Amino acid sequence: MYTLPNKLKLFAIIFMVVGALGMIAGFLTAPSSTAEVKEMMAAHGDGHGDGHAEEASGHGENHGEANAHGAEDAHGGEEAHLEHVLHQMQNRPWSALYIASFFFFMISLGVLAFYGIQHVAQAGWSPILFRVMEGITAYLPWASGIILILLLLSTMHVNHIFHWMDPDLVNPESDHYDKLIAGKSGWLNSTGFMIRAVIYLLGWNLYRHFSRKWMLNHDDATDNRWFKKNFKLTAGFLVFFIYTESMMSWDWIMSFDPHWFSTLFGWYVFAGMMVCGITVIALVTIVLKSQGYLKDVNDSHIHDLAKFMFAFSIFWTYLWFSQFMLIWYANIPEEVTYFVTRIEDYNLPFFGMVAMNFVFPLLLLMNSDYKRVNWFVVMAGIVILLGHYIDVFNMVMPATVGTSWFIGLPEIGSLLFFFGLFVFVVFTALTKAPLVPKRHPFMKESKHFHY
Amino acid sequence: MASKVIHAIYNDDDILMNAVKAVRGEHYHIEEVYTPFPVHGLEKAMGLADTRIAITAFMYGCVGLCVAITMMNFIMIEDWPQDIGGKPSFSYIENMPAFVPIMFELTVFFAAHLMVITFYMRSKLWPFKKAENPDVRTTDDHFLMAIDAGKHDIAKVSQFLSDTGAIEISLIDKEDDH
């Protein structure tokens, strides 16, 4: 049995406290009126304002006839601009919170899917790692609760990170009426959104609950009844998962840009989820090994996990590029704005993330021998995880805060808070059952696994 | 003077594996083992050096990538620039995303094909090559271990080999043009 080291507990609690302070500071420093925004922008110097002025004049030249109209608007335009920036700045702490909570949610859900695949494939190498995976998926109920609360707050208009929830947009009488969003309101409406969220989360959590319970039952059983039952349940779960995961990614991520759509978005989010999940399995396994547990886990198991990290990083890049290239080549305005925004306003995180998620793992993990060197896997894993955090950041932030982005207190605070919570919940869950299943049909094969 | 080899024939891969370990333990030199199918772990038991084909694959991939870049640059930019979908081909870098699939495919193509050719050349296989296996039964269900006789006492080695489970042992004059 694993006991939670006091140091680790303290470490997790410190992270949560520091992170919570950062988050609170983020909420408190968000401006509450346009006057404050003006002050903040003045404090930043004139650089920002000048840039805008140039942009505006360049714009005017291109559209000579529109000039008179533009001059008339100038005053109102400035007030509207401040109002716009105010909303972006108010969205920022909420978006930061949402991104960090979604990121750790995505890790535990990715591990759950990977765990399910191992059961259904009846893989021989991995049963020795099942308890580690179950430990990580123990975070899923926590993450689900948090994300459900965040979504509920959005539908109650406590924050405005989901632009399409504004009822004016679908009201034909209103000045803000948006034909495209109104056309999508059959799917994108708050009621349906919450009902779907509950269905997804309930389905995934029920599977996690019963699979864990039945695998523990199997340890004390004398036949393979629970094993077979779990096999059938898992097969059903995977079918449910691949549909609901895709819909979840439309609802919870893609709808931040309600005009935009991408048909492979579900796969894209799925690939990111799998890389993060498998990386975390490898990291937790290496941590447990360094504490003297999991004696039968050898370098070949780490090698296999690193192979998956490498392969899914490539798969993620393949999808990232497929999405990018088709939209770039076709150049259809309503699609291409997505990448124009990211390349112009988020240049460094956008391309930096591709380097971290593709170039880094490609070069670090290509050599077969390096996949067996534990500290190498840890280094690559940390870069991959940070890279995928920035990936989620890039998926959410451009739509909610636009150009007012920065990786500062709210972002780092939320990340630290959820990291602390994740470590605390996962390592506490690992103490609840022996770290290696007592009896599993493929246990012997898994223990003797070698490459 | 032609050197002599001892051919020991086995009929089971597990027995063969143990025999290989025992023979190496006695410091006899195994020239080659002929098997009807790849025996897992045999190369480690024989003490063969790791394959370096992965390194060649990486280099061939780099060559393929360079070929793709040069080729697309010549075809699409220098020789016959075209305006495709409002994206005129004036510079390679601006049109690079469109060429990525070709860069990827040629990397894979070069790595795969040149790796296979390298493997054939390294294992001395080419069309119309005369088979090297000394006993046709090694293509069916028997395993053959060729041991360099050297200056060892033939009778002692033969006794040792039959103790390891060999079903047939024969002494062969090795031909020079091997």
Image (cartoon, grey):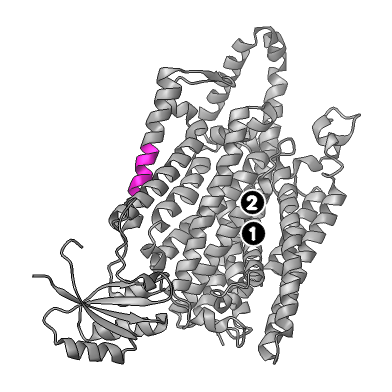
Dot 1 falls on which chain? A
Per the model, the C-alpha gap separating discs 1 and 2 is 9 Å
**Residue contact at pointers 1 and 2, CB within 8 angstroms:** yes
Q: Is residue A445 above or below residue A300?
A: below
Q: Is residue A396 above or below residue B156?
A: above
If the image is split into quadrants, where does the C terminus of chain A sit? bottom left
Callout 1: 10 Å neighbours few (<14), some, many (20+)? Answer: many
Q: Is residue A67 above or below residue A141?
A: above
* In the image: residue A228, left or right of residue B113: right
Residue toward you, A320 or A401:
A320
Amino acid beneath label 2: Val
Which residue lies under the disc numbered 1? A106
Image quadrant in which you'd find residue A86? top right
Q: Which residues are magenta?
A: B58-66
Tell me, for residue A269, which label it has, or none: 2
Tell me, for residue A397, which label it has, or none: none
If the image is split into quadrants, where does the N terminus of chain A sit? bottom right
Q: Residue at x 28, y 70 (%)?
A: B48
Furthest residue toward left: B1
The answer to if A309 sits in the magenta stretch is no
> Of helix, strand and loop, which mostly describes the magenta segment?
helix
Q: Residue at x 51, y 18 (%)?
A: B82
| Element type where label 2 sits in the image | helix
Amino acid beneath label 1: Met
Please state the horizontal and vertical placement of residue A96, each as a whole percent of the image.
63, 51
| Element type where label 1 sits in the image | helix
